[in-house]
Image (spheres, grey):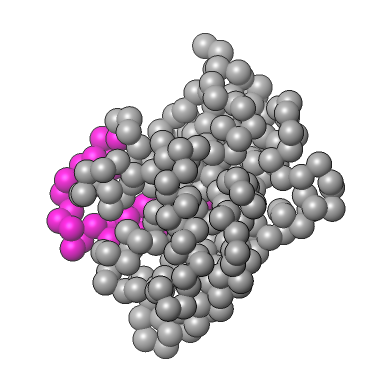
Amino acid sequence: MASANGVTLHGGWHSPFVKRVQIALKMKGVNTYDYVEQDLKDKSPKFLEINPKGTVPVLVHDGKIIVESLDIIKHIDEAFPGPSIFSEDDNEKSELLSWMDSFDKEVLFPSWFVFWKEGEEGKKVKEEAIKGLKKLEEQIKGKKFFGGDNIGILDVTVDFFAYGIPILEELTKIKLLTEDEFPCLLKWVTNYCNDPFVEEYFPVDDPLAKEYFPPKGPLSASYKAGLQSHPPKDRFAFYKSAFLESENRRPN
């Protein structure tokens, strides 16, 4: 059976990288496509045939398989008509892609590790995370969004800090984004979370489900069972394993 627009996105409800691709598709005007929720705790042979690494997101477009969110977003931008979601200028596009790649390595993953590495290792990653976040604070100062007055691809890249990091802060009682250090970034969080363009990709309002921001659609049986069987104090470990099985762009 042919997929809508020849596009199928394989994803996981927990993955910020999948959310990036979903929003990039919307930015490009690709609103009709097939979405397949993958159970990364029980990967099907069919999915492993598509992507032997077993990570999400995976985009299949007219038979072409693309993995890794940045490569997928580049493909979306080039394969579908309409204004570029990066820039019409090749040099600016290259700079944006470099920024997005550096963000994951220098800000996203160190910030993530703050919540589950301890001792000297934990201290080191927190220093690295704070250093990266201070750069973001300077970049967003005086702006509504990283892209200016409207949400752009840089905002989409950073959006885990709008909904994911606050969840981790609540779960672990570790505060990373403080008003004293990051007032502009926290203002961006408010602006981003209240923008109707992206609100459909945010967590449902249920206070328990919100901890793991599942989609408004049905969860896979494995994840549903995982959420139900893990009391709140244990859910962080469950979520951590789910996140790390998402996209294989994390440091070793």
Q: Is residue 215 left or right of residue 36?
A: left
Visible residue check, residue 172: yes
Q: Position of residue 36 (x, y in %)?
A: 44, 29
Q: Is residue 130 left or right of residue 178?
A: right
Residue at 50 percent of width and 82 percent of height? 127
**Residue placed farthest to the bottom in the image?**
120
Asked if residue 222 lies in the magenta stretch, the reply is yes
Look at the image and give the residue range highlighted in magenta: 219-247
What kind of secondary structure does the magenta stretch mostly adopt? helix
Q: Position of residue 218 (x, y in %)?
A: 29, 30
Visible residue check, residue 121: no
Residue at 56 percent of width and 70 percent of height? 137
In terms of depth relative to the viewer, which is nearer, 89 or 185? 185
The vertical placement of 186 against 129, above or below, is above
Identify the image quadrant of residue 24. Answer: top right
Q: Position of residue 173 (x, y in %)?
A: 26, 72
In terms of depth relative to the viewer, which is nearer, 15 or 226? 15
In terms of depth relative to the viewer, which is nearer, 174 or 72? 174
Asked if residue 235 lies in the magenta stretch, the reply is yes
Residue at 48 percent of width and 50 percent of height? 192
Residue at 56 percent of width and 32 percent of height? 26
Q: Is residue 248 left or right of residue 240?
A: right
Q: Position of residue 49 (x, y in %)?
A: 53, 33
Identify the image quadrant of residue 150. Answer: top right
